Image (cartoon, rainbow, N blue to C red):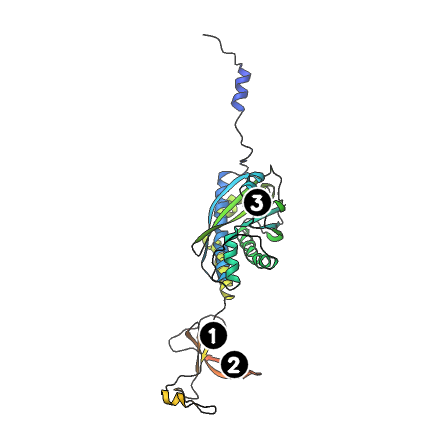
Amino acid sequence: MEASTVTPDAELRARRIRRYDFRHPDKIGKDQMRELEALYQHVGRLFSSYLSGRARIAVEVSVKNLEQMTYEKYLEGLPSPGIYASVQANPLQGNWLLFMDGVTGFILLDRLFGGRGDSPEEVRSLTEIEQTVANKFLMDLCHSLAEAWRGVVKIEPEIKATASNPIFLQIAGPSDAIVVARMRVSIRGYEGGVEVCMPYASLRNVISRLSPQWAGVDQKTRDFGFMEAILTSLLDAPFEVKVVIGEGRMSLADLYTLRAGDVICLERRAEEPVEVLVEGKPLFLGRPCRVGRTLSVLVTGFPEGNTRVCSGGS
């Protein structure tokens, strides 16, 4: 048998060599990635409430996965056209990239423009007016990020630029490491996606805070911002309000002979309060009055058996 030609020094060097995939750089540990995933689950809940309130339709946002890779590899998998925004997450260094797929964007735009929220026949670049409206739900995502990251670092995301192609929003070098958080968006039977791309250079100084700070926050504290966002969205939701002055019955013959100047008697006494209906439900009692030249109703109480709808005001 021939003697081995491998020297002890060469064998020692071989043991020290380990494979490293430069296209999948793992700069953040598994424990911290798990904490990031928990943080973005919170982002998803917040963003879901923002979108549901703004579009007045059920929208569900949940985390799909988090992944580390190079910026070049990330760009290879992005569609064009899409809805992209470069965001400066002050005081963190550099910019983040926000992405929403075009179909989800057009469904939301259709709702905001008064439509049913149907899927588009084709995905195209946004017009100037559409981009202005789309910036509203991009800002909703920024608010969700700020609220969720508050337990780690207080950030103030600000949209710096928007585009339909990510190559126009260069936030990192091709070989720079990034972390991408992918979230699925379910709306009217369609499942789309929203992504947040964060360069590692932006997270380097705060990533060590994830484990002790985020893990130490109990679920009630985490959900406080979520409930606050839901309330904020509901406060902006429009409701139909009607006032029922009274009701009456009359025969077809009387209805046929009605002329201008005739008086219709209602089945309500003049001193009785009128009902104020909110979305068809009687929630208040009131008395007709006038404010300037506008016919109005002074709220005087609540229907019997109904409690107050809010804790403040009368």
Give whichever of discs 1 and 2 has the lower sequence position. 1
CA separation in Å, label 2 and label 3: 53 Å
Q: Residue at x 48, y 40 (%)?
A: 31
Q: Is residue 129 above or below residue 270?
A: above
In the figure, 181 relative to 247: above or below? above
Q: Does residue 288 appear anywhere in the picture? A: yes
Closer to us: mark 3 or mark 1? Answer: 1
* Residue 69 image-quadrant placement: top right
Q: Amino acid at mark 2?
A: Ser
Location of residue 267 by image quarter? bottom left
Q: Quadrant of the N terminus?
A: top left
Under circle 3, the secondary element is strand
Mark toward the start of the polypeptide (2 vs 3): 3
Question: Horizontal and vertical percent for residue 127?
Answer: 59, 57
Residue under label 2 = 296
Secondary structure beneath label 1 = strand
In the rendered image, which residue does mark 3 sit on? 198
- Residue appearing at x 54%, y 84% in the figure: 290
- Residue 178 left/right relative to 254: right
Q: Classify mark 2: residues with Cα within 10 Å, few (<14), some (14-19) or many (20+).
A: some
**Residue denoted by label 1:** 241
Camera-nearest residue between 199 and 175 = 175
Judged from this view, the residue extending furthest toward the top is: 1
In percent of width and height, residue 77 lies at 53, 42
